[in-house]
């Protein structure tokens, strides 16, 4: 990001429909942001992981600076090192905060890494020294769901950032955003979320590959001893009123009901995997931090073992 005599403009890109269309249209109007930032939790849906390099290549061709930023944990106490939201959940034996009706996972894994990246850049530092605010572009559209999200943020003041919502300025809905992406010759991305997020719809869970489904079962099994107020990742049961598809509050129960994994595989994960993970953590606690194997390696062995069992 080159130094400017003005405050820089940063687009917060979630790799979903709205923020992608916003960036495409801003570039087409000659209003390209100075930089596009995407925060990767390390636990995105497989379709999102495939779309991110595709769109970044498009931005590169147009000369739009873009970066993927991540939250980098540094203090692991006696735990094995972890690097993603999924690994953090398995380490702590809990569910994402959004499953409890809170949003700290988004703050920690998405907003904070973008803010830290911005804070380290000279143009932002100079702007703040001049008493100016960095402009942050947010992809909220004019559909009912984003109207509610916008209403929650409206009036919030930040001494460092001025928030702008171009899609709302243009009167665009999510449908408009999808059409704009198609006109650009790009595939319409899926909704951006972690693959175990409470926002996942039943059809989206059905579409997940087995490796992801196994990890959902593992997350809920690992957290089960501590759960009191929620059934699982989906929080509570949906009865199916108003056209919604009925589903349990537990994604594991849904995976069973739908036959997305075999009964024996689900049972094996629930009975064996949490204890195996705890044994792995206990072994790591006896080692110096530099000698501890990361959680990602244990997860790779977990899935590889189930692959062999299913073969």
Image: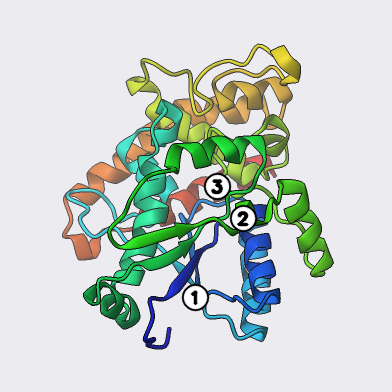
Q: How far from the left and from the top, in percent, is residue 183? A: 83, 66
Q: Nearer the viewer, mark 3 or mark 1?
A: 1
Instruction: Give the distance between the C-alpha atoms of the residues marked 2 and 3, in whole angstroms.
Output: 46 Å
Instruction: Tell me the SS state at disc 3.
Output: helix
Which image quadrant is residue 139 in? bottom right
Which residue is depicted at the point 68% across and 43% down? 208
Q: Looking at the image, tell me whether mark 2 or mark 3 is earlier in sequence order.
A: 2
Q: Which residue is mark 1?
A: 35
Whether 159 is drawn above or below 32: the answer is above
Q: Is residue 7 left or right of residue 43?
A: left
Q: Is residue 115 left or right of residue 205?
A: left
The numbered disc on residue 169 is 2
Residue 260 appears left or right of 101: right
- Horizontal and vertical percent position of residue 53: 63, 71
Q: Is residue 273 visible?
A: no
Q: Nearer the viewer, residue 100 or 1?
A: 1
Using residue 102 as the reference point, say whether residue 282 is left or right of it: left
Badge 3: residue crowd in 10 Å (few <14, some 14–19, many ≥20): some
Q: Secondary structure at mark 2?
A: helix
Say which residue label 3 marks: 303
* Residue 267 in sight in this render: yes
Classify residue 51 by image quadrant.
Answer: bottom right
N-term-proximal mark, 2 vs 1: 1
Image height of 242 relative to 37, above or below: above
Q: Could you tell me if the residues under marks 3 and 1 are in contact, i.e. CB atoms within 8 Å?
A: no
Q: Position of residue 160 (x, y in %)?
A: 30, 62
User: Secondary structure beneath disc 1?
Assistant: strand
Position of 298 relative to 309 (above/below)? below
Foreground pick, 160 / 282: 160
């Amino acid at each position: 990001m080159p130094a400017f005599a003005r405050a820089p403009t940063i687009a917060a890109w979630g790799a979903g429909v709205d923020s992608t269309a916003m960036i495409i249209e801003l570039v087409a109007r000659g209003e390209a942001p100075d930089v596009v930032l995407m925060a990767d939790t390390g636990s995105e849906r497989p379709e999102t992981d495939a779309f991110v390099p595709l769109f970044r290549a498009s931005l590169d061709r147009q000369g739009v600076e873009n970066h993927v930023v991540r939250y980098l944990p540094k203090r692991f106490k006696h735990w094995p090192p972890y690097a993603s939201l999924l690994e953090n959940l398995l380490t702590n034996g809990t569910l994402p905060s959004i499953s409890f009706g809170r949003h700290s996972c988004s703050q920690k894994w998405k907003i904070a890494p973008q803010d830290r990246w911005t804070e380290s850049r000279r143009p932002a530092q100079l702007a703040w020294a001049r008493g100016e605010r960095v402009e942050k572009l947010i992809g909220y559209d004019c559909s009912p769901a984003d109207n509610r999200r916008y209403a929650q943020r409206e009036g919030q003041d930040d001494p460092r950032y001025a928030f702008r919502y171009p899609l709302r300025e243009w009167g665009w809905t999510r449908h408009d955003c999808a059409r704009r992406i198609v006109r650009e010759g790009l595939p319409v991305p899926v909704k951006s979320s972690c693959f175990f997020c409470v926002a996942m719809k039943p059809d989206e869970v059905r579409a997940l590959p087995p490796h992801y489904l196994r990890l959902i079962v593992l997350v809920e099994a690992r957290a089960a001893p501590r759960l009191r107020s929620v059934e699982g990742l989906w929080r509570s049961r949906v009865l199916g009123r108003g056209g919604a598809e009925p589903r349990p509050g537990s994604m594991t129960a849904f995976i069973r009901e739908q036959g997305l994994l075999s009964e024996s595989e689900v049972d094996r994960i629930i009975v064996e995997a949490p204890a195996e993970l705890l044994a792995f953590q206990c072994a790591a606690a006896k080692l110096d931090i530099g000698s501890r194997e990361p959680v990602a390696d244990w997860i790779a062995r977990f899935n590889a073992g189930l692959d062999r069992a299913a073969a």
